[in-house]
């Protein structure tokens, strides 16, 4: 396997500090980095750069894992200094964050671009001096029609989905992060954005079932027409 052209040197998981926000949708990025630290055997986090920092060795070399403790809207005040001190260029900083515009359970990568209304990403772009840094977006979905509150209330609330589904979401995001570390972000995007195992077969079966239903309706309609002609 070829080494990534721009190996990730810093992974930052966005969220809000303190027990009040633990387990909320807005802290999905933090949850992914905490799991990644366990998988990579990073050891304890230390207070540094306005956040919790753990250093280890990733598949492509030295790696730092950062969980800003500055609150979401000021995440760049932690990510910016950390990237500068670690000599990590923006393209070597992978930012993991919640994404309300992706359905719950979906994980997607992105190589750069705008902030899309996400205040944490806006702050990181300011801290790095550019929006051209890779992201790992963890889909938390939009609130249901009966939700009483706005989008901010939604992401600051705790996951209401079954615990197993939340854990699966965080694990899948950590899987993609590990792939980005080993293969590079573009390769991870190509692999994880592909259809999930079995999805093509399910869609094929759905199309066949729909076709049979349509054919059944056509046969039924034909018999009715014939009967009417005979009458």
Image: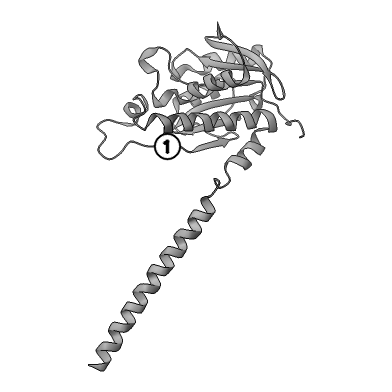
Q: Would you call the spot at circle 1 few (<14 residues within 10 Å), some (14-19), or many (20 or more)?
A: many
Query: Which residue is rendered at x = 43% and y = 68% of the image?
Result: 211
Q: Quadrant of the C terminus?
A: bottom left
Please determine whether, in this image, residue 217 is positioned above or below residue 225.
Answer: above
The picture quadrant where one finds residue 2 is: top right
Task: Name the residue at the bottom extreme.
Answer: 230
Instruction: Examine the rendering and report whether any part of residue 60 can be seen.
Output: yes
Q: Identify the residue position indicated by label 1 in the image.
A: 104
Please determine whether, in this image, residue 74 is positioned above or below residue 111.
Answer: above
User: Whole-percent x and y of residue 126?
Assistant: 54, 21
Task: Name the residue at the top extreme.
Answer: 47
- SS for dot 1: loop
Task: Name the residue at the left extreme.
Answer: 231
104 vs 6, nearest the viewer: 104
The number of discs equals: 1
Q: Is residue 146 left or right of residue 173?
A: left
198 vs 84, nearest the viewer: 198
Task: Name the residue at the right extreme.
Answer: 2
Please determine whether, in this image, residue 105 is positioned above or below residue 178.
Answer: below
User: Whole-percent x and y of residue 165?
Assistant: 42, 33
Q: Quadrant of the N terminus?
A: top right
User: Whole-percent x and y of residue 206?
Assistant: 45, 59
Instruction: Examine the rendering and report whether any part of residue 126 can be seen.
Output: no
User: Whole-percent x and y of residue 213?
Assistant: 38, 68
74 vs 49, nearest the viewer: 49
Query: Which residue is rendered at x = 52% and y = 55% of the image?
Result: 201
The picture quadrant where one finds residue 164 is: top left
Give the image's coloring scheme: one colour
């Amino acid at each position: 396997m070829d080494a990534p052209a721009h190996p990730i040197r810093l992974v930052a998981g966005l969220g809000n500090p303190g027990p009040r926000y633990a387990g909320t949708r807005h802290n999905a990025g933090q949850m992914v980095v905490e799991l990644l630290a366990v998988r990579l055997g990073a050891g304890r986090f230390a207070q540094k750069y306005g956040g919790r920092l753990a250093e280890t060795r990733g598949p492509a070399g030295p790696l730092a894992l950062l969980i800003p403790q500055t609150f979401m809207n000021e995440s760049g005040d932690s990510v910016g200094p950390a990237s500068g001190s670690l000599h990590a260029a923006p393209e070597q900083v992978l930012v993991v964050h919640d994404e309300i515009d992706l359905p719950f359970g979906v994980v997607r990568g992105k190589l750069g671009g705008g902030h899309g209304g996400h205040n944490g990403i806006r702050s990181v772009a300011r801290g790095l001096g550019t929006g051209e840094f890779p992201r790992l977006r963890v889909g938390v979905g939009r609130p249901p029609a009966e939700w009483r509150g706005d989008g901010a209330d939604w992401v600051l609330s705790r996951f209401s989905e079954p615990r197993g589904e939340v854990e699966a979401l965080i694990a899948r995001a950590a899987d993609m992060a590990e792939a980005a570390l080993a293969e590079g972000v573009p390769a991870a995007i190509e692999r994880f954005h592909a259809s999930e195992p079995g999805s093509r077969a399910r869609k094929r079966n759905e199309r066949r079932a729909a076709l049979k239903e349509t054919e059944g309706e056509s046969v039924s309609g034909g018999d009715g027409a014939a009967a009417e002609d005979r009458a």
